[in-house]
Amino acid sequence: MTAAPTRVAPARTTAQDRPRKPAHLARKAVWLVVVLVVVAAFWGVDISWDALWDMPGKLGHYLGLMFLPPAWDKLPEALSATMLSVAMAWFGTALGVVVSFPLSLLATRGLAPVVVRWPLRAVFALLRAVPEVVIAVLMLSVTGLTAFTGALAIAIGSVGTLGKWGYEAFEAVDGGATEAATAAGASRAQVMRWGVWPNAAPEVLAFWLYRFEISVRASAILGLIGAGGIGKMLVDNIQFRVWDVVGVLMIVVVVVTMLIDQVSGTVRHRIITGRWELPVVTALRRRSARAARLEASPSVLEDDVRSGTVG
Amino acid sequence: MSAAVAAPGAGGSPRDAGAGRVAAPARPSRPRRWPARVVVLVVLVAITAWSWVAVDVDLAALAQNFSNAQDTLVQLFQPDYSFFGETLQPLLETVQMAVIGTAVGCAVSLPLSFLASRATNPNGPLLGVVRTVMNVVRSIPDLLYASIFVTVVGTGALSGVLSLVLFNLGIMVKLVSEALDGVDRGGQEAALASGATWLQADRAAMLPEVAPQYVSQTIYVLELNIRASTVIGLVGAGGLGMLIDRVRTFYQYHYLSLIILEILVLVLLLELLSSAARKRLVR
């Protein structure tokens, strides 16, 4: 600040010289509201928290009943019930794919007029908002709940998610191919076939598979309210307190779900990247290579991250 | 010249192309992918046919039931708004369960996600154990947790909250630990180089990196929880689901449709809120 020609060593910065810490008032207000909501929820909810104290002991007791040892002789029955659940999931998803595919094309910007697009998107949003179980409850009251109606409930639910992911994928397609097709005189259908589909196909196919994984979980849940399959068997055995059978069923649910996720994840990876990456084989072969790659650019697992966050 | 004919990806035999057939149209031959495609298609059709048989598709019975259910449908399309007062308490409980479940679940999931990411946990065996346990936790559906907790701690909101917490743990740990795998590790390296312990380095350098994603996933999980907590009551775990179960057993469909309408409004409201909040976070 002085006008002296000589250079002065800069004074030590004091608290006043430093830029003031931003107040972040809005952020603090948001935090306050969040804390208040959480406290209010704890305060208002009708729970006697004392029950938590003897929960670990009880839980241990029941886990012991379930898994020490599980009733392995029920395994074949459990597996066949699981197959029914998986069939429900597959059939529902397939039906959902068949229905949602044309609909999502019709909901894509640039491929369909607004009057078609927005109502369709509203329908997707509506279907996504209703949990599958609620759809199943509705179907239960109208048509009765069988494995088939369970599959229909899954199909209706998948139309909501698949429809949305579909038009988002179609809209994310790079405009070049579409423009070229249009310039060459293609009709709307031809633009979809040759301009949009080849670009969006891998992602859309991967979404179908991912939706199947979700449906597998959903079909187990639908069983719990009576649609048959593994869930039905579970709820029956829980009701009659046959805990060792429940243990087997839980093991089956976990193993089958993880297995299907693994297989489907591998296939999805193949569809997106064009390379097979088998879970164990590749992991062993490339363990060191992957570590090196993680150091260099930590962006492996990108498709898993994406598939995990859509919803 | 003829090298252009043997374009990359051309199947068949590129040697033919080089053998002097210059007059052939200068197009790469189509890749021969159809055998693989046919196999895939056959497999898919076979699985679908099997599932068709397994779920016992019976359109006639469906149509029959549908036409028998005229009154049900009429009731479903005429929600009885006078029932609204009675739904308030369960509705509130649903929201409370979702909030508590999210708060507890996300709080517990933070340290677990640091243990479950290769980027923040140098201990291989511990990493493996945490990941395996979390995979198991994640593969059990929420309603199954609920039905087990209902028998362990009794019906009511507590079993609902417990099952939501476990349900959240599975999702949050996966999403956040994968986010941790993806963040820039420069800060952590610097911290480690300057003598910090792994705990300190993760706290000082990695936590701020994932914080936005953590918050964003928390909001997403809250959205999932609202959805889940409306239905876990069906097996007795408190909230709107219990009411659904009650009106369903008494065939009060005009009440049922009101409840479903409420769920719809609740979920859509929260989705709007959550997508707005997450958009802001990302920006």
Image: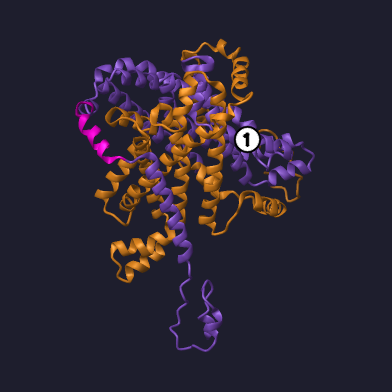
- Please, what is the dominant secondary structure of the magenta stretch? helix
Shown colour of chain B: purple
Q: Amino acid at mark 1?
A: Ser
Shown colour of chain A: orange
Q: Position of residue A101 (x, y in %)?
A: 35, 51
User: Would residue A181 appear left or right of B8 to someone viewing this image?
Assistant: left
Q: Position of residue B174 (x, y in %)?
A: 58, 38
- Residue A86: in sight, yes or no? yes
The residue lying at 71 percent from left, 35 percent from top is B126
| Depth check, front residue: A85 or B221 | A85
Corner quadrant of residue B198: top right
State the residue position of label 1.
B113
Residue situated furthest front in the rendering: A73
- Residue A36: in sight, yes or no? no
Position of A284 relative to B176 (above/below): below
Q: Position of residue A207 (x, y in %)?
A: 45, 48
Which quadrant holds the C terminus of chain A? top left
Chain for mark 1? B
User: Would residue B262 appear left or right of B231 to someone viewing this image?
Assistant: left
Query: Bounds of the magenta span?
Result: B58-72
Mark 1 crowdedness (10 Å alpha carbons): few <14, some 14-19, many ≥20: many
Which quadrant holds the N terminus of chain A? top right
